[in-house]
Image (tube, rainbow, N blue to C red):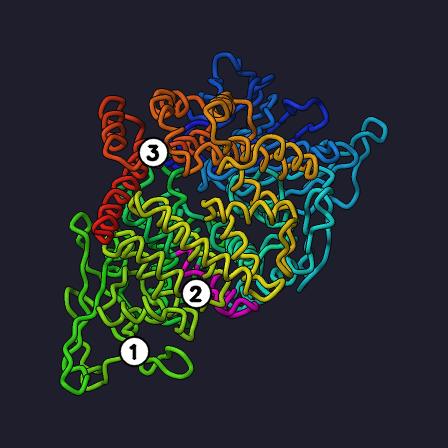
Amino acid sequence: MAGNLTRDEARERARILDVESYVVELDLTSDDQTFTSTTVVRFGCSEPGSGSFVDLTAPAVREIRLNGAALDPAEVFDGERISLPSLEGSNELRVVADAAYMRTGEGLHRFVDPVDGSTYLYSQFETADAHRMYTCFDQPDLKASFELTVLAPADFEVVSNSAPDASREPVEGDEAVRWHFPATKPMSTYITALIAGPYHVVRDEHDGIPLGVYCRASLAEHLDADAILEVTKQGFDFFHGLFGVRYAFGKYDQLFVPEFNAGAMENAGAVTFLEDYVFRSRVTDARYERRAETILHEMAHMWFGDLVTMRWWDDLWLNESFATYASVYCQAQATRWTDAWTTFANVEKAWALRQDQLPSTHPIAADIPDMQAVEVNFDGITYAKGASVLKQLVAYVGVDAFFSGVREYFAEHAWGNTELSDLLTKLESASGRDLSGWSREWLETAGVNTMRPDFEVDGDGNFTSFAVLQEAAPDHPTLRSHRLAIGLYDRTDAGITRRHRVELDVSGERTEVPELVGTARPDLVLINDDDLTFIKLRLDERSLRTVTESVGEIAESLPRALAFAAAWDMTRDGEMAARDYVRLVVTGLGGVDDVAVAQTLQRQALSALVNYAAPDWRAEGFDLLAARLRDLLSAAAPGSDLQLAYAHGFAGTARSPEHLSLLRGLFDGAIVVDGLEIDTDLRWTLLRSLVAAGTAGEDEIAAELERDPTAAGERAAAGCRAAVPTPEAKALAWERITGGSLANAEFRATLGGFMEPSHSELLREYVDKYFDLLAEAWAKWTGEFAQTFAEFAYPGHLIEEETLRRTDSYIETESPAPALRRLLLEGRAGVERALHARAKDAEAGR
């Protein structure tokens, strides 16, 4: 991130300034390092004579004129800000700068396709990187219209927030073309956009909205535009009916761009996506489901975030939680992924629960004092816990009242900025409920509640009493009000099915449930049936035994997912031995027909082995899990999604000579599994595991890269080379990671290979190097690189007390910036949790 704007600075600037318009001209034809950026900003000042500043990060500034008077860049520009002295009531600022193309995924990113040498550009401005491309007041509540003119090479497609003029002006013969994009409605700088290059495009139209789907030309053969457009059209139809306000930004382009740092970005009318969503090899339906959720998430932002925008980043959750909730709600109601809430429970809620138990946990409505703080707040609380709490709020006020309030919110605040209270006011009006207490409990406090059943039964096995017990962590002692359901499940010929359901309000430490008195005790008691609230769930002894022995027999996907989630949470908390969780997955995985759940369980079992299993049992556990995945792979329906999921899972868990030999056979083609195509991406997966185990090396990596000389192939090769288990390979990888020469995608791939979990002893010597470099990286690298390095190079692989002591010493002696301190504490908490869980697993082995 360029600069570190504080909330106080932003408030003061918004107090005196009213930004009217930006007129921006960019010349993309000069060289491969910089581009000319000319910006004219018109803005008012309520206190004439006072001063302020405007944001710009650029290697050189040629001209600054404020109200016709020249300002000396050497005096007013510090590399990130331009001081604006003695403002008038109405002002015009003109700045001409040489701005820099980026390779970090921030600002205006430049990428050269290794396949055909074509150049591709795209912008990424959230949270505050628009001023890497043009001069602006880079904060969300200073909205303005945005008009753009771009001089680009003649073979470029150029895309921005508005549709371009139909005619384009040739310049310099036929070598360049000038594109003009008319002024938009008022919008925040972080959702303005520019995407340019020889992109392949598929166009369509739906309900009067022009649609475009873009990708690099070399990926065009893999672009399944029809499937993307199908979800897009379903989303528009659903959201138009749900939100009561039509889509406001004219055309709607979706662009799959290279080396993207996130899943997607909600630029108004020009959404950018990670191009990994253009599937060049076969993937399971879980990936299509995730892509659909991302498409719908960004579309929901067109209303919640783009049309109506948070005033400051404290309310980032209003953007992200709402978009997450709305996307899953739409998926379940309007697309073929009718079990989307099951995936939500397995993926988003697991992320939220993990984040909410870290020492850095924070209220959903967070305190964001500056831009560095918001950069680390794109987390499981802001997205997933917030969405879970919105689901709870819908259950609390009723779905009709909730969306009635949302419709009023959009209608009143269109094109403006809001705070949390603006939304709550509309929801209170629509529902008739006072939400001030709900807001205090759910949005303004941190931590997660734990619930467990408490009951007695008579000699006939009927409940004579039943209550729900609620607990809170000592550091975050809030006991909340919950709307939840309790499900009673029995073993039947049709599997484990629900016999009875009770829905009720729960509050305080103990809530009696008289409706269940006299009811026969079931095989499984599931508190939070249908996943209505955000809690940690505990199972009684009989229910846990049912889950452990027969989880795969639970007939419906959501309760089965909740049962698995309860066991996983108990494992993470050291209440269930890691070996018992791995055995649970081994026992139950064959009964899971939902591929998204199956893949989640495999990832969690692998994590249990790496982080939570006692070292002396780990090899046995890997053999147990790998053998089960091998058997499931052999027995799976040929060509099925589950077969592919088992293949990837087996590759990730193979450790023994026998299993590595099978991997080698699959990779070399000596072993064939009916229906399993060893395509490009699966070949890289197999090779990565063989390399990390020391049974393949540079010859195989080079040969595979020759087969796949694409950007994705280069990233995979970089990860493989960093995963070679030798001191020399690790030293070279470290040099590349810290040398400043890598683009963002290759940086992440190299770091991932370097930090291969099975190489902990090889990485021991890099602990001091990590801590020695950390302060310099945080101060001098861009926000994206610094945060990635701080988080993913942390020595969490060394699960020992010394890692805790080393972290504590660094924090005490160096007093790192709050955002960096948070990342270190999160890494430390992971090690501490793992130590506790390993002790539990070791005890179970005695």
Mark 3 Cα shell of 10 Å, populated few (<14), some (14-19), many (≥20):
some
* Residue 322 percent across, percent down from the top left: 43, 57
Mark drawn on residue 668 = none
In the depicted structure, whether residue 774 falls above or below residue 284: above
Q: Give the range drawn in magenta.
A: 325-348
**What residue is shown at x 64% (from left), y 63% (from top)?**
230
- In the picture of the structure, the residue carrying the numbered disc 2 is 342
Looking at the picture, how far across and down is residue 257, in whole percent? 62, 42
| Helix, strand or loop for disc 3 | helix
- Which secondary structure, mark 2? helix
In the rendered structure, the answer to whether residue 668 lies left or right of residue 491 reads right
Q: Provide the major secondary structure of the magenta segment.
A: helix
Tag 1: amino acid: Leu
Residue at the image position 49 percent from the left and 18 percent from the top: 77
Identify the residue shown where x is 23% and y is 84%.
520
Residue 292: x %, y % from top left: 56, 58
The kind of residue on which mark 2 rests is Thr
| Residue at position x 68%, y 45% in the image | 215
Which residue bears the numbered disc 3? 819
Question: Which amino acid, mark 3?
Answer: Ala
Q: Which of marks 2 and 3 is nearer the N terminus?
A: 2
Q: Residue 431's quadrant in the figure?
A: bottom left
Q: Name the residue under label 1.
A: 488
**Front residue of this view, candidates 604 and 615:** 615
Q: Marks 2 and 3, how far apart in space?
A: 33 Å
Q: How far apart are marks 1 and 3 (CA)?
A: 45 Å
- Considering only order in the chain, which callout, 3 or 1, is on the residue closer to the N terminus? 1
In this view, the residue in front, 437 or 492, is: 492
